[in-house]
Image (cartoon, grey):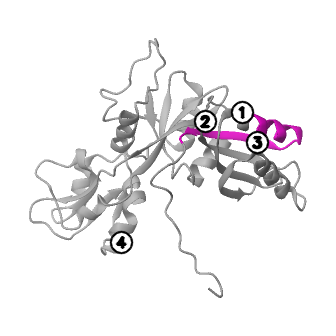
Amino acid sequence: MLGRISRESSAHAALAAHDAGWSGVAAGSAVISAVPDESTELLDLGTMTQALATVAGIDDLAAVVHLGHPEQPSPALEQALLDGDPRLIVTAAATVGTQWVWVAPPGVVGGQVVVDEAGMRDCADVLRSMGVSPRLVPTATPVAERAALAGEQGSLVLERSRVPAGWTEVPGSEHLGEQPPVWYGLLEARGAWPQFSAPAQVWLAFGPSDDHRGSLRQTLGLLADAGVDLQHLRSHPSTYGPHVFFSSFRCPDVAVLDALVAELDARSVSHRTLAVLPGDRFAPGPEALTPRWVGA
């Protein structure tokens, strides 16, 4: 059985799961789906915290979550995973083409634009570039209620499969479909990370045993000695004193990850493997930054 976080677009999450062939039901399980059709709708698991706790607590249940990007994880997801049950891990990644459209009743142009939380996350920059100031509503808001909020002269941004009968796309809607695909992952509760003999993207959180000068350098030295391709590193304060660090790197096989973790254990470095995502390259990549350095 598959679920999603309340704020996530069920249409996009279900499409990602369908295209990737994911299933939350173990082979031979008697568990049945809690929704009529998992190809278009996923079980609402509540907030991020509630969803992670539910996945950890119920057998045969997995969640489809928004990743950010395999090489540059969403900070909110990283932190929620590390704050959650130690068995939680993301085990697969897939993209889905954006399904967002901007629609209104025939002949309507302008007025109030109603959009939900997932739509705002994915489309805010494009909408603002067109001079739109959206009205945000919870993702769970029914389409009929959104239409009522928009009023007779308003419009909606929502998934193509949910467009009200008779509504049509307005000028500028095509720009929403020009955005890069959205990355989703399969979140499970497992006793150990998956075995992999080909390259995979690994998310590893770690906390040096003490926060002295050079402690991070020593831990990063272990990563360098392991020969992994570090692509992401972020720090966050920890209630235990030293900072916690989130990393993402390309790992050639599970033996390298096993050896790296053994070295961390030997040096009393706390750690959690938050994701193992099979794949050597994840295209499209994270949005690139064009830096302007001093003196350049």
- Percent across and percent down for residue 55 are 55, 30
Q: CA distance from mark 2 to mark 3?
A: 13 Å
* Label whose residue precedes the other's in the sequence (4 or 3): 4
Which three-letter amino acid code belongs to the residue tagged 4?
Answer: Arg
Q: Quadrant of residue 107?
A: bottom left
Give the residue number, with chain letter if any, for mark 1.
Answer: 255
Q: Residues within 10 Å of mark 4 (few under 14, many from 20)?
A: few
Q: CA distance from mark 4 to mark 3?
A: 40 Å
Q: CA distance from mark 2 to mark 4?
A: 35 Å
- Percent across and percent down for residue 101 are 25, 56
Residue 86 as seen in the image, left or right of residue 13: right
The dot on residue 128 is: 4
Q: Residues within 10 Å of mark 2 (few under 14, many from 20)?
A: many
Which three-letter amino acid code belongs to the residue tagged 2?
Answer: Ile
Give the residue number, with chain letter if any, for mark 3.
Answer: 271
- Can you say whether 184 is above or below 173 in the image? above
Which of labels 1 and 2 is toward the front? 1
Taking the spot 25% from the left edge, 48% from the top edge, the residue there is 143
* Label whose residue precedes the other's in the sequence (2 or 4): 2
Q: Residues within 10 Å of mark 1 (few under 14, many from 20)?
A: few
Which of labels 3 and 1 is toward the front? 1
Are circles 4 and 3 on residues that touch, CB within 8 Å? no
The dot on residue 89 is: 2
Q: CA distance from mark 1 to mark 2?
A: 18 Å
Residue 20 vs residue 34, the one in the foreground: 20
**At numbered mark 1, what does the secondary structure look like: helix, strand or loop?**
helix
- Percent across and percent down for residue 206 are 76, 47
Indicate whether residue 121 is drawn in magenta. Answer: no
Range drawn in magenta: 258-279
Which three-letter amino acid code belongs to the residue tagged 1?
Answer: Ala
